[in-house]
Amino acid sequence: MITMKFGGSSVASPEKMKHCAELVQEFFDEQPYVVVSAMGGVTDLLLDMADAAVAGKREQVDENLELIRDKHYVVLEANATDPELRQKAREELDPLLEEMKNILHGVLLLKECSPRSSDMIVSFGERMSVIMLSATLQGMGLDAGWVDARDMVRTDNNFTSAIVDLNTTRDLCQTWSHAWPKGKIPVFTGFIARNKEGITTTIGRNGTDYTATIIGFALGAREVWIWKDVDGVMTADPRNYPAAKVVPQISYAEAAEISHFGGEVIHPKTMQPAVLVDIPVRVKNTFNPEYPGTMISSKADPTADSIITSSIKNLALITVEGTGLQASPQVPIHVLSVVARENIKIYMISMASSDYNISFLVQEKDAEHAEAILKKELAVFQEIEHTINPVVVERGVAVIACVGANLRGRVGVAGKIFMTLGDAGINMIAIAQGSSEYNISIVVRDEQTKKAVSAIHDKLDGTLS
């Protein structure tokens, strides 16, 4: 069995939906279990509707509802050519559209949309998409049916980015599989789940990749295929760096580093279930299916000679310094604990060898809150010893991660990267290297990100050996 995941851009139109169905048909002998995202643009429309409802913009809500309904109806008209099949799919779709309308009109009345309500609203994208792809497969004569993954994927109560209980999920998936008809193609909703109380949650934006590896982990897939609109994992974002090329093979650790530092091809949590049972994950291009793509597994490519760069902009660098950090080992731990307690994601940590200061990166939108809570918490230490300086926040920065398993143990690679950036006139604000030695992270000004990535590629690609 293989798990095949199709993202929103892969199923954005009737023609693309049909193409994905043809790929499923092509690999029917592999016993495909399919996971699908909302149709391209639908999740954004749903979120826009939620914002419009909070703002009391009923007309905009109703217009978007019509857009979403028409977008799905067009797929059924084109792909579910049998009238009986099309009518059956509409009977499944229409109640979802009505439910969605009622929820949004409730938000209009309350002028409030909690994270719990937001998760419920965006869940409709995937719930409608599986009906479309199932009907398309059935229209081609294949035995297929849709599956609501919320019945199996269990999470905590952290709405919009819930943590999955993999053990419970595996048990529920295996119970489901015993009842599913042999030979019938299941089409699972991606991204959505339920907590133990049965309330709808989501596992993070673009989380359908994660659902695919969860299903693969739970049901013993031979491989997980992530179908995207690019040829695989690339050495940089091709939208900003046209010379970027596909990397044929990387390890789970490299993939995790790339996704953590902004690589959009892979969801950050995707690797977790795959690592547990060592399932290879292959990233392939829906629109260039003959291309082999990128294989992600427990093994790095020993012949790889490229640096993979990924980056995140719109960050803020927060620094706490003073001799009090040297005097009290509790301070650095306390600083990070305070920020983590507030659910603020930390992207990188850099600490002076003298223990005089500690710096870390957060999203710029979280910087003000992080600064406020740190000032409050560190006041306690200031009362004991007046050697901790005011918290310093530098906004408008980005982090560039230079990733590669073959960075490990390579003498002089870090020096080459730093020299390259210096020659390009790029000031490095902070640096860090993970203990795995797979990643060197560099903080630069936002506006210098593209220039920095280009410099690293131009000077260092293919020169690591």
Image: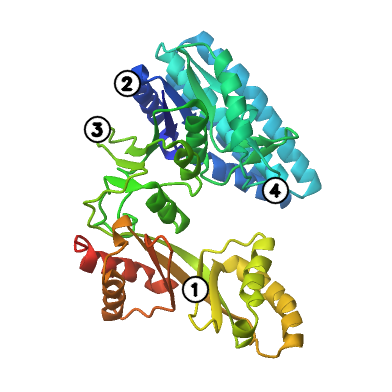
What is the C-alpha distance between the residues marked 1 and 3?
43 Å
Examine the image and state in which quarter residue 66 appears: top right
Given contact means CB atoms under 8 Å apart, are the residues at marks 4 and 3 in contact?
Answer: no
Label 4 neighbour load within 10 Å: few <14, some 14-19, many 20+? some
Disc 3 target residue: 290
What is the C-alpha distance between the residues marked 4 and 2?
40 Å
Image point (59%, 20%), residue name? 176
The amino acid pointed to by label 2 is: Glu
Examine the image and state in which quarter residue 165 appears: top right
Disc 4 target residue: 115
What is the C-alpha distance between the residues marked 2 and 1?
49 Å
Image point (74%, 77%), residue name? 376
Which x, y percent locates residue 75?
47, 25
In the image, which is nearer the foreground, mark 2 or mark 1? 1
Label 1 neighbour load within 10 Å: few <14, some 14-19, many 20+? some
Against 206, residue 385 (above or below) is below
Q: Secondary structure at mark 3?
A: loop
Against 253, residue 361 (above or below) is below
Given contact means CB atoms under 8 Å apart, are the residues at marks 4 and 2 in contact?
Answer: no
Quarter of the image where the N terminus is located: top left
Seen from the viewer's position, the closer of residues 49 and 231 is 231
Which x, y percent locates residue 302?
24, 51
Which x, y percent locates residue 428?
39, 78
Q: How is the image coloured?
A: rainbow
- N-terminal label among 1 and 4: 4
The amino acid pointed to by label 3 is: Glu
The amino acid pointed to by label 1 is: Ser
- N-terminal label among 2 and 1: 2
- N-terminal label among 4 and 3: 4
Using the image, tell me which numbered label, if any, was put on residue 350.
1
Image point (24%, 32%), residue name? 290
Disc 2 target residue: 26
